Image: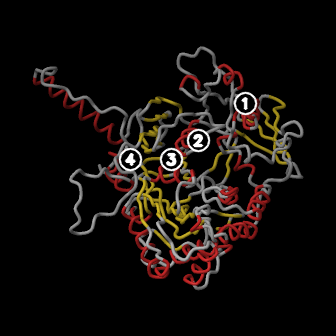
């Protein structure tokens, strides 16, 4: 079989040696046994089932759902816990722990009835069993609003009555199987919000018994999900569930130890390359059987099953506190000129705004709804001349441009540099280009110790407002605008902002010239043949294997 080799158990079969099986008959039996085990090993049959391997840049350090924020932790808790609702393949909220629910006529009160027989997975070497009741869903939300929790889900549930601290929090449990939420105003997305980790149940007695270590080890993690925690060490997190039909029964969230995390194109003919083979990444790793799924360029998927999406915007950011870049006109000229390059790599397209196409507003694509929000710029040469004059300068001098390591990004930034030379060369727009590891580049920009940088921006959620808000208060660039900050705050107070209001804030931000969107990057979740029904959220990313199956490829 072909694709069956993608689904491997955790431990390799230890071969029998000549010494331990000295007799020929015993050797034959050993060979037969190895062959029998190997068949199950490759196909995922028997009690082991099929395994799903996903690489991460760091092993989850905390399995507390109320504080899980980055991708590895969110993937782990999404599969370890069950909420009242769950997001299905159609991006719809369906009932999970809840048996039924009602909504009041005014849309302010949601009442859920829990399914009978809900329980937490029993902990090893732990005598006490903790019941799962409606009170656990109440306590989870109470924890979200505790200051010491510092939960990233506080804003998500800010529409709950009393969330602003003016009264009792609007969540209660009249009995062991009933949970009631009271909202300050109707929220059409409330069912979807209840599927997020922040709303997963938390048993108060167990939490207190954990004495500040809740979710930090297997012994202090009490979960109720379709999967249970099997092992957790420095190499990865391993989840299992009982076999049932073709359902995937094991999720392996493992540390990516490959030497290169970003796919790099083949070198041009005649280029000197290192002799050591580059580990397979992305689609190549899926095809090789190293992983079951991976993120890669959409074009790299080939014949492999994939879910394409566009949630990354590449942009130039300018340090507005640098004298040479302090003029809005200089920044707009540099940004508009850079956007003029025409030869883009496969998977890249010209950006018409900062918010990427994957973001939706009111069920429709935001970019399709509002169109381009790029500032109108005339003659870039004249604009640059005016801007330099405003800063008391005639020419650029000693400017350095930072960009992420990688052949693709080097090619792009070199084209940008050539474009600047072509259009703005009269002002000595020949800048030094320096490649930096992406993590280091991000921290350098955050510290303000840079002049110009090329960076990717990807939302961590489907919330366009939250995406724009990361640029308020002069973040990244030192550019501050009372108008933009005010627009961001107004949008944050709306449950369902309209696209036009979001566009106004985006327009204000881009008009300042401190950040200049250049390109969108198409990506895809690439999967092994035979894997189906994975629920994928590109904002993270997050994978939910609740309904995931493997039927052979």
The reply to whether residue 357 is in sight is no
Where residue 526 appears, as percent x and y from the top left, is: 43, 56
325 or 228: which is nearer to us? 325
Occupied quadrant, residue 32: top left
For marks 4 and 2, the one nearer the N-term is: 2
Q: Which mark is residue 136?
A: 1
Q: Mark 2 and mark 3 in contact (Cβ < 8 Å)?
A: no
What's the colour scheme? secondary structure
Q: How many marks?
A: 4
Residue annotated with mark 3: 548
Q: Mark 4 and mark 3 in contact (Cβ < 8 Å)?
A: no
Residue annotated with mark 2: 78
Residue at 10 percent across and 21 percent down: it is: 23
For marks 1 and 3, the one nearer the N-term is: 1
Q: Mark 3 and mark 1 in contact (Cβ < 8 Å)?
A: no
User: Where is 449 relative to 29, above or below?
Assistant: below
User: Where is 44 relative to 133, above or below?
Assistant: below
Residue at 52 percent across and 75 percent down: it is: 395
Where residue 496 appears, as percent x and y from the top left, is: 77, 59
Q: Secondary structure at mark 2?
A: helix
For marks 3 and 4, the one nearer the N-term is: 4
Q: CA distance from mark 4 to mark 1?
A: 36 Å
Residue annotated with mark 4: 291
Q: CA distance from mark 4 to mark 2?
A: 20 Å
**Label 3 crowd bin: few (<14), some (14–19), many (20+), radius 10 Å:** some
């Amino acid at each position: 079989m072909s694709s069956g080799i993608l689904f491997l158990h955790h431990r390799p079969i230890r071969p029998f040696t000549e010494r331990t099986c000295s007799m020929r008959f015993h050797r034959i039996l050993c060979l037969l046994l190895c062959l029998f085990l190997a068949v199950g090993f490759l196909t995922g049959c028997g009690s082991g089932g099929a395994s799903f391997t996903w690489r991460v840049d760091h092993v989850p350090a905390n399995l507390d759902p109320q504080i899980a924020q980055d991708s590895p932790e969110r993937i782990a808790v999404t599969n370890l816990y069950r909420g009242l609702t769950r997001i299905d393949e159609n991006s719809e909220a369906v009932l999970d722990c809840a048996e039924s629910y009602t909504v009041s006529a005014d849309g302010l009160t949601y009442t859920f009835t829990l399914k009978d027989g809900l329980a937490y997975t029993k902990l090893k070497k732990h005598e006490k069993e903790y019941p799962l009741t409606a009170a656990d869903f109440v306590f989870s939300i109470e924890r979200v609003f505790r200051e010491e929790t510092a939960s990233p889900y506080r804003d998500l549930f800010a529409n709950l009555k009393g969330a602003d601290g003016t009264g009792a929090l609007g969540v209660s449990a009249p009995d062991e199987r009933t949970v009631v939420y009271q909202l300050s105003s109707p929220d059409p997305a409330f069912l979807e919000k209840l599927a997020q980790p922040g709303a997963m149940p938390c048993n108060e007695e167990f939490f207190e018994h954990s004495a500040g270590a809740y979710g930090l080890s297997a012994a202090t993690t009490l979960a109720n999900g379709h999967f249970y925690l099997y092992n957790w060490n420095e190499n990865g997190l391993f989840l299992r569930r009982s076999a049932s039909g073709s359902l995937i029964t094991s999720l392996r969230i493992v540390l990516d130890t490959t030497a290169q995390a970003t796919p790099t194109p083949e070198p041009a003919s005649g280029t000197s390359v290192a002799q050591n083979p580059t580990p397979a990444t992305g689609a190549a790793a899926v095809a090789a059987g190293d992983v079951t799924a991976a993120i890669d360029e959409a074009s790299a998927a080939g014949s492999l099953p994939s879910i394409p999406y566009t949630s990354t915007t590449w942009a130039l950011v300018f340090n507005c506190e640098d004298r040479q870049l302090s003029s809005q006109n200089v920044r707009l000229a540099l940004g508009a000129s850079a956007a003029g390059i025409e030869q883009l790599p496969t998977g890249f397209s010209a950006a018409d705004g900062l918010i990427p196409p994957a973001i939706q507003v009111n069920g429709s694509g935001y970019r399709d709804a509002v169109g381009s929000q790029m500032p109108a710029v005339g003659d870039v040469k004249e604009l640059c001349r005016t801007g330099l004059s405003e800063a008391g300068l005639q020419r650029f001098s000693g400017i350095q441009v930072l960009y992420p390591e990688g052949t693709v990004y080097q090619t792009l930034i070199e084209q940008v540099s050539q474009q600047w030379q072509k259009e703005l060369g009269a002002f000595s727009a020949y800048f030094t280009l320096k490649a930096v590891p992406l993590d280091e580049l991000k921290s350098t920009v955050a510290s303000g110790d840079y002049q110009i940088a090329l960076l990717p921006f990807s939302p961590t959620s489907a919330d366009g407002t939250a995406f724009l808000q990361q640029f308020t208060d002069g973040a990244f660039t030192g550019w501050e605008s009372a108008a933009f900050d005010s627009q961001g705050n107004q949008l944050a107070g709306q449950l369902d902002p309209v696209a036009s209001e979001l566009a106004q804030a985006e327009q204000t931000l881009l008009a300042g010239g401190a950040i200049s969107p250049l390109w969108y990057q198409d990506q895809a979740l690439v999967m092994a043949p035979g894997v189906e029904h994975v629920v994928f959220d590109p904002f993270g990313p997050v994978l939910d294997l609740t309904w995931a199956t493997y039927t052979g490829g």
